[in-house]
Amino acid sequence: MSTVPGGPVDRDTPAGAIHLARQRRAKPNGWWGMVLFLCSEVTIFGTMIATYFYLQFGVHHWPPRGISPEKVAYPSIATGVLLLTTFTMWLAARAAGAGARRTVLLMISLSLLIQGAFFGVQVALMSSDLSRFSPRSTAYGSIYYTLTGTHDAHVLVGCLLGLAVLWFVARRGLTDYWSTATRALALYWYVVNTMAVFVLLTTLSPSL
Amino acid sequence: MATVIRPRGQQYVDLLDRVWGERKGLVGWLTTTDHKRIGIMYFFTALAFFGAGGVEALLIRTQLFGPNGHVLSPAAYDQIFTMHGVTMIFLFVIPMTTGAFGNYLLPLMIGARDMAFPRMNAVSYWIYLASGIFMYIALAQGHAPNAGWFDYVPLASKTYSPSINIDYYGWGLIFNGIASTATSINFIVTIFKLRAPGMSLNRMPLFCYAFLAVSFALLFALPSLSVAALFLELDRQLGFQFYTASHGGNPLLWQNLFWIFGHPEVYIIILPAFGIATAIIPTFTKRKMIFFPLVALSEILVAFLGFGVWVHHMFTVGYPTATTVYFAAASLIITIPSAIQLFAWIATIMSGTPEFKTPLLFIVGFILFFIIGGLSGVMLAAIPFDQQVHDSYFVIAHFHFVIFGAAVFPILGGMYFWFPKVTGRMYHEGWGQFSFWCTFVGTLVTFFPMHIVGLMGMVRRNYTYPAGLGFSTLNALETVGAFVLAAGLVSIVANLLISYHKGAPAGNDPWEGDTLEWSTTSPPPPYNYPVIPTVTSPYAMWDTADRELDNKRLERGEGVFALGHRTPGSTVQDAEVDELLEMPPHSIWPPVTALALAGVFVMLLLQHYFIALGFAAVIALTLIGWHRHGAQP
């Protein structure tokens, strides 16, 4: 054991987790795992956004005739509000490193409220879009709904992950594992929020 | 020099044996998280799919033995050649290299006790197995994918392929891609975070560099395939219009997305072969690799450049010359890092004292085939030439020299090379050499004449050809070659199977190998190393003083970490010990999760979307179960 700086710690207790977080020089494995997973997800978004413009450059009218360009206001406001969770999730991640469990619970809950509301607004916006045009009639509709749907799915999965982390942190406390999980969750939301901006700009590009 | 366990160290070894003991029997295999057992399962599964893909290849060759062949109907032929490609690429080569070789060897080579995420490693395997079964159910039903392994639309669209065949392809590849993505994440974190103390990045074996490059390439290439297949299924099942030109879609979107994945994929297939070559060559030439840093950089550069050349598969679609010329140039640039490695291998062999045992013979065969395939690759990068021979057997010859000759020969050599480590027994050298010559001659006779019939105008994917075109003799020769090749491959499997029961004991280090795996027992214990080794160079086994030090540390109980499933986690660049990781023991959840995921994909295939959602909820539940006891993912 003597080769390990700081000696063995009990990573399953909050005190041990704080100690570990302080002495650790590299990022924990869970953090790396999430970063790499997100690389894959960002590539998926990148591929879809590239598809959007690839299809746009192949036709004369984009969106096709009969489909009015997207309204700018509502989706922009919704995305703007979602971006606030970048800050709350950052606070949650920071509190996780310091072992401040109540702050973590509070910040994840607050984020979940905003994220859940955003998801609700997205569903409403999508159903209003569906009454205007179908994903089946044109390639524009296909990529529009696939791109926004993929983004919404990421928001939904993020909410479920948030709920799981909230529940486990509440029950188990900020062990090293759940402290790392909180940081990984924050990373997930940083990326999803960034993607929200790209998806928004892409889908609004004909209106801008 | 191998780890020698002296009496004082024995108490620690006994303790480790108790802590790391695995369950026995079928339950043990189902619930294992040991990277070696998972590697072995990958090996046998991939080998089974290799057999299936091989039988398909023989069916194709039998059909083409003479003109107007009728062994297979045209429809059956379409399914067989499509499944041959899909099987060899997605169910054999990638799982065999990353899954079997990578899983078994990588943690050993970097001196770790397991992968960074052992349970995720297990779930990757079960997902891979399920996705393979998924696609072979299609073949058993007579509804296998039948539009070629690159599945071009509009042929693959609902209009022209209305039956379920293509849906097996679309969902099957997304399903399979999940396993590969998880595996690549696991490899990268393992390489970054679990290296033995002292194994800074510049002291990492070249084998590991190759696997690092492959993992990154997989991570960034697979999304493109998954998205393309998702679009395809949305078009086919829900009537979306991604690929329908009449509704603003674009069939070329498929080609672009497919090859943005497909070309890096070629390097994903061949880079592990480079890694295996760089492991075998120093051992059998008794010298260190020449140009170590250049070879390491070249391995990474090949993976990186592979993302910028995809349009060279599309020179005949009518893109402007400015576009195609860029991609031709980019394709030619890849010859530079490839040639650096090629010269480094040849120079190392020539300046060392080569001992041409079976593994090195396969590497020499690999180098020869890589040169042949590389030269025809340079020819194909020339746009006018490519436009002439596009879709002809010349292309088939080219890529079989690269992804069979060059990619699979090191796998075969690697099987012989590490057989003593995995089983503790030696293979039969005489039969080994025979099997090399048999596969070598078989490969040449099968694939070389394809260059000629291709230049004569024989087109790929046609189920037969008429007499009188001058194709007949060469095709008959190719078919004979294919059976010689198959005999060679069977003799390898037979040699290894018989040697497993009757081979001479191998000891820890029969080859005086250069990397760490040779320091532990054959086969290695579940915890790999009784004492976590310390490393001062990429040729850790040749640093005898370091290994002697390991033995002394074992006596003192230093670096043993016997009080749990523990392995040190280290800093990314310098591999200084940073923390002690608690690795999870066996778990039943990985196969359960994979089963639920299989449920999702079967329901998607059958268009029961709400039931698919139900299975997704089951996955969420299994993930909660996954976290019920353990601490680590």
Image (spheres, coloured by chain):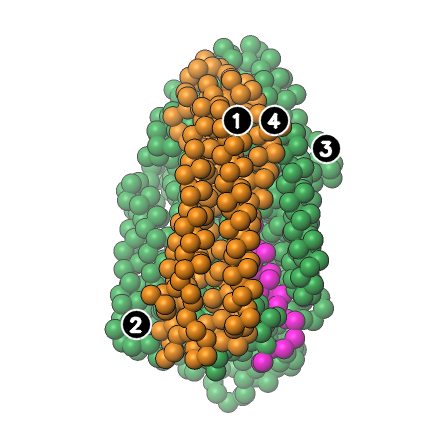
Chain colours: A orange, B green
Q: Name the residue under label 3.
A: B24
Question: Subunit of mark 4?
Answer: A
Q: Quadrant of the C terminus of chain B?
A: top right
Viewer-side label of 4, 1: 1
The magenta-colored residue range is: B159-180
Co-location on one chain, circles 2 and 4: no
Look at label 3 and name its amino acid.
Lys
Helix, strand or loop status at disc 4? helix
List x then y, in percent, for residue B352: 33, 40
Q: Does the magenta stretch include residue A162?
A: no
Q: Name the residue under label 4.
A: A172
Look at label 1 and name its amino acid.
Arg
Q: Name the residue under label 1.
A: A102
Question: Subunit of mark 2?
Answer: B
Foreground of the two, B230 or B449: B230
Q: In this view, does B313 lie above or below B100?
A: below
Q: Name the residue under label 2.
A: B324
